[in-house]
């Protein structure tokens, strides 16, 4: 009963909340299709975040804490963008949950 | 702005008791746990074939084990005092969200199989068979109770719906019908050490970042140590404090207070979670297994005291059960309570005059305080009755100039749940969470209008995440919810250490000896 999404003619399995079942399956098209589901169009600003999430995950096996993310964004793109407001403007359902989904990361669980 | 597929209740000056709408929330049910999340907790992977017999047997077992459960199921006289007390009923109008309606789902089955009148004359006494339909109602409505216990304050017989919900969830787990959100999370605690699944290296990286940030902000080296053997205090805090906002601002505040105290402290990667979702699912075994991690960490790190961060239900488990779950704690310093709440710790230092605050640094805010349900109704702080209400307020008054209470029917022991407690803080229950927040949103909106309140403070990770999510549904800003120790963090005047003097060289990674002792 697994759900799937179609990316470039290929089927990808996702869980009931729309997160990619296997992180290793991820291709950039996954993010584009998922963003389409949420009526978002990905810009280079979105991709900066998605790429950072994937790099961080590769090193730490977990999504970065919000503060780690905002700090990295601030360093890279300027202090005015190093805050959650900026991230929410890109990912209205929350940088942790929505951006992780696009990036193929598991959903952060717990009291968040 | 938040969009929704359901109607957000309009705010009103007083939360009115709605006309009932039977079945209004019958469709609400969280995702069912998969086998991979069930089995590490000792539960069947999926609904077992003989689920009916096993559910009834489990109910019998719980009735034998918990005398309170049988009393609660027997004692209700249908007086109606609870009917308008639950935030989920007030927000959804579904009569099964009246506490008595919820209890009756279990009570009917109890009567059918465990009372002679129900066995012989079921219809006369409202006894019902455990059918698949009933089972689905259990799954739905026992996941619409946040176990906040507000109803029990008003019940003349003292019936605690939270315990009934916990029992129901334990029965459901025992037949393979678990809730994904809670059970996946408990599995992560066993595997990684915390609800979020933050491994040690990620924790260390995050904490190093905080040390840099605080140094950049204040010029004082405040340390956020982890796994430091021989520290005096083990700080156990919800993993959301590492990860989310505004939680992390609270963690920064704890570190600053501990810095000023001069007492050495440490976090633990093994016990990197204060939360204990074993309580939400009513499972003593899992609650104990989670709590034992704290004991193991305390022994391994040779600490003398244990302090808990801002987490509502964790404090219930810690304050009420930690000794029986994971004690005896005879290896800790007997001069201090086991465990201690970070608010007690901060309050004690304030009383001793050992903390200096510049309250004006919080003058951009007008504050109110949300009592978290598990702290308010299931625990205490300090050595006086009601300390769990007074101590957090005393800290706010010590750190802020502008503070106003919400309506007295919505605070202290009558506080309303945030709407996301008890294992319901999950996106698949967002409609329930938004609607259940209405009574709190009404009260908050009133003090915003009448007193100019700008921010609400809480001492629970769930409350903070829940409000961050639901405030925008009511036209408010997610930033309006703050950690209590965030106020402390803003106002505290830090004492520079010997190596904080104007030298330019950063000798960052060198772990400087803590200069202070007790």
Image (cartoon, coloured by chain):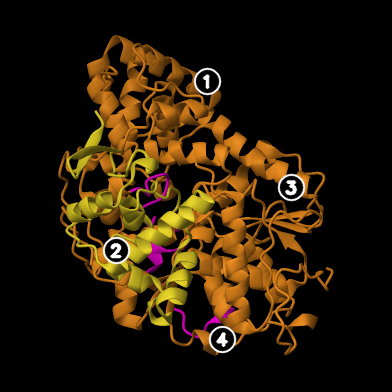
Q: Is residue B140 visible?
A: yes
Please, what secondary structure does the residue beneath circle 2 have?
loop
The part of the image, by quadrant, that contains residue B242 is: bottom right
Magenta span has B405?
yes
Q: Which mark is residue A91?
A: 2
Give the Cα separation between the discs numbered 4 and 1.
54 Å
Q: Quadrant of residue B490?
A: bottom right
The residue wearing badge 4 is: B359
Say which colour chain B has. orange
Q: Residue B44 appears at what percent x and percent y?
A: 43, 21
What is the magenta range?
B398-426
> What kind of element bears circle 1?
helix
Residue B45: percent from left, percent from top: 41, 23
Describe residue B27's horizontal placement relative to residue B177 as left or right. left
Chain of the residue under label 2: A
Instruction: In the rendered view, tell whether residue B317 sits above or below residue B235.
Output: above
User: On the image, numbered disc 1 is attached to which residue?
Assistant: B64
Residue B493 in the image: above or below residue B189: below
Q: Would you say residue A112 is visible in this rendering?
A: no
Q: Marks 2 and 4, how far apart in space?
A: 35 Å
Task: Tell me which chain the residue with mark 1 is part of.
Answer: B
Q: Is residue B479 above or below residue B94?
A: below
Q: CA distance from mark 3 to mark 4?
A: 35 Å
Mark 2 or 4: in front is 2
- Label tally: 4
The answer to whether residue B378 is above or below residue B513 is above
Q: Nearer the viewer, mark 2 or mark 3?
A: 2
């Amino acid at each position: 009963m697994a759900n799937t999404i179609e990316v470039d003619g290929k089927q990808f399995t996702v869980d009931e909340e729309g997160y990619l079942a296997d992180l290793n399956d991820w291709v950039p098209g996954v993010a584009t299709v998922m963003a389409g589901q949420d009526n978002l169009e990905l810009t280079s600003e979105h991709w900066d975040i998605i790429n950072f999430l994937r790099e961080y995950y590769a090193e730490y096996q977990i999504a970065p804490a919000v503060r780690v993310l905002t700090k990295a964004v601030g360093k890279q793109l300027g202090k005015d963008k190093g805050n959650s407001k900026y991230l929410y403007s890109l990912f209205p359902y929350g940088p942790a949950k929505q951006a992780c989904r696009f990036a193929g990361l598991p959903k952060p669980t717990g009291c968040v | 702005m938040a969009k929704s597929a359901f109607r957000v209740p309009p705010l009103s000056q007083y939360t009115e008791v709605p006309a009932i709408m039977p079945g209004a929330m019958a469709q609400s049910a969280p995702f069912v746990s998969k086998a991979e999340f069930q089995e590490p907790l000792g539960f069947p992977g999926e609904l077992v074939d003989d689920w009916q017999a096993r559910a009834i047997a489990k109910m019998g077992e719980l009735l034998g084990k918990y005398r309170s459960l049988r009393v609660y199921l027997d004692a209700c006289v249908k007086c109606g005092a609870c009917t308008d007390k639950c935030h989920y009923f007030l927000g959804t109008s579904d009569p099964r969200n009246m506490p008595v309606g919820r209890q009756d789902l279990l009570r009917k089955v109890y009567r059918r199989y465990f009372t002679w009148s129900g066995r012989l004359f079921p219809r006369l006494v409202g006894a019902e068979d455990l059918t698949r339909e009933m089972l689905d109602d259990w799954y739905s409505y026992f996941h619409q109770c946040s176990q906040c216990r507000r109803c029990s304050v008003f019940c003349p017989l003292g019936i605690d719906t939270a315990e009934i919900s916990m029992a129901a969830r334990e029965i459901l787990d025992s037949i393979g019908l678990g809730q994904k959100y809670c059970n996946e999370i408990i599995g992560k605690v066993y595997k990684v050490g915390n609800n979020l699944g933050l491994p040690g290296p990620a924790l260390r990286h995050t904490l190093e970042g905080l040390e840099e940030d605080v140094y950049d902000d204040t010029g004082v080296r405040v340390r956020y140590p982890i796994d430091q053997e021989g520290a005096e205090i083990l700080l156990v805090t919800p993993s959301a404090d590492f990860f989310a906002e505004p939680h992390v601002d609270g963690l920064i505040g704890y570190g600053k207070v501990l810095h000023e105290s001069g007492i050495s402290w440490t976090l633990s990667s093994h016990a990197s979670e204060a939360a204990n979702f074993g309580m939400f699912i009513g499972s003593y075994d899992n609650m104990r297994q989670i709590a034992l991690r704290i004991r193991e960490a305390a022994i391994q790190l040779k600490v003398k005291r244990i302090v808990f961060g801002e987490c509502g239900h964790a404090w219930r488990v810690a304050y009420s059960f930690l000794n029986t779950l994971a004690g005896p704690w005879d290896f800790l310093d007997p001069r201090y309570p086991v465990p201690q709440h970070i608010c007690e710790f901060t309050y004690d230092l304030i009383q001793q005059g050992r903390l200096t605050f510049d309250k004006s640094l919080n003058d951009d805010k007008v504050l109110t305080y949300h009592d978290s349900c598990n702290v308010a109704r299931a625990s205490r702080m300090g050595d006086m009755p009601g300390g769990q209400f007074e101590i957090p307020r005393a800290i706010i008054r010590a750190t802020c100039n502008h503070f106003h209470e919400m309506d007295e029917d919505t605070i202290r022991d009558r506080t309303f749940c945030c709407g996301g407690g008890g294992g319901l803080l999950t996106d698949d229950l967002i409609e329930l969470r938004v609607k259940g927040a209405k009574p709190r949103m009404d009260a908050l909106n009133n003090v915003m209008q009448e007193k100019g309140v700008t921010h609400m403070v809480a001492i629970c990770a769930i409350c903070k995440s829940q409000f961050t999510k639901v405030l925008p549904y009511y036209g408010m800003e997610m930033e309006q919810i703050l950690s209590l120790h965030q106020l402390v963090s803003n106002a505290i005047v830090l004492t520079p250490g010997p190596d904080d003097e104007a030298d330019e060289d950063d000798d960052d990674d060198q772990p400087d000896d803590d200069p202070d002792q007790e």
